[in-house]
Image (spheres, grey):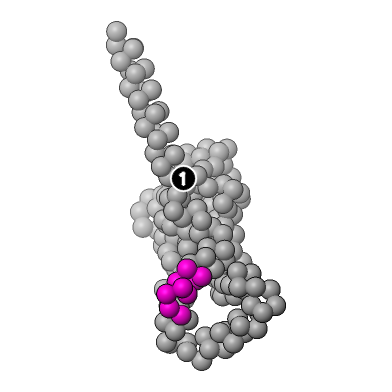
Amino acid sequence: MHGDIVSLAKDLWLVLGDMPADVPNVLIYRKGDRLYLLDSGAGPIIRASILHVLHDVGPVRSFTLLNSHGHADHVGNNDVIRLAQAKETHHYIAEAGLALLDAPSYFATQFSTLSAYYNPVSGYQAHRVRWRAVGAGRDIAQAVVGERRTLELFFALYLRKFGPLRPSPRDASDLRVAAAAAAGNRERDLDRLGAGRR
């Protein structure tokens, strides 16, 4: 059930999402004094479950948040990184996902780009009446505040279904930067080992 915490193995927990509501599962893994969170889901139920596991695990030396990508339903509770009882914290996301952490702006840009070729609203066949109303409201709002700001406002309203969004773009690092740093550390470690053998 949505928000349930399932122990998959020792030090490995799955927080169940809600697929009909488009809220993904969350994975938490502890390795010694390091704790890893894969995606943070969205909404208060997932958030409470993550915080429950963090409380049960207790203090750790290192807490790492890994976002598979930047969609709102995967980053909505990213601020748990600030609540982790850890001496150091890390947050990694693919470079392409960084723009998604500002979801209303990102979706407004995508929508504007697509609308040059076709009406993206017409693709929402399941919610045809609702989207017609949105289209009428959008036309009125555009006349008042302009297209870009109107799109940002509409997407901000739509994204409210995920609960309060708490993305953390200021905490995020590009995974390529982290991989390069890890490779550099590995090279230094190999150099040290080689120097110690001489």
Residue 115 included in the magenta stretch of the image = yes
User: From where the camera sits, is residue 122 visible?
Assistant: yes
Taking the view exactly as shown, the residue that stands out farthest to the front is: 116
* Quarter of the figure with the C terminus: top left
Q: Which residue is mark 1?
A: 174
Image quadrant in which you'd find residue 135: bottom right
Residue at horizontal 53 percent and vertical 47 percent from the top: 172
Residue at horizontal 51 percent and vertical 70 percent from the top: 112
Residue at horizontal 44 percent and vertical 53 percent from the top: 96
Q: Up-down: is 82 above or below 155?
A: above
Q: Up-down: is 192 above or below 78?
A: above
Taking the view exactly as shown, the residue that stands out farthest to the top is: 198
Instruction: Left or right? Give the position of 154 relative to 114.
Output: right
Residue flagged by tag 1: what amino acid is it? Asp
At which x and y percent is residue 84?
Answer: 57, 48
Name the residue nearer the viewer: 161 or 51: 161
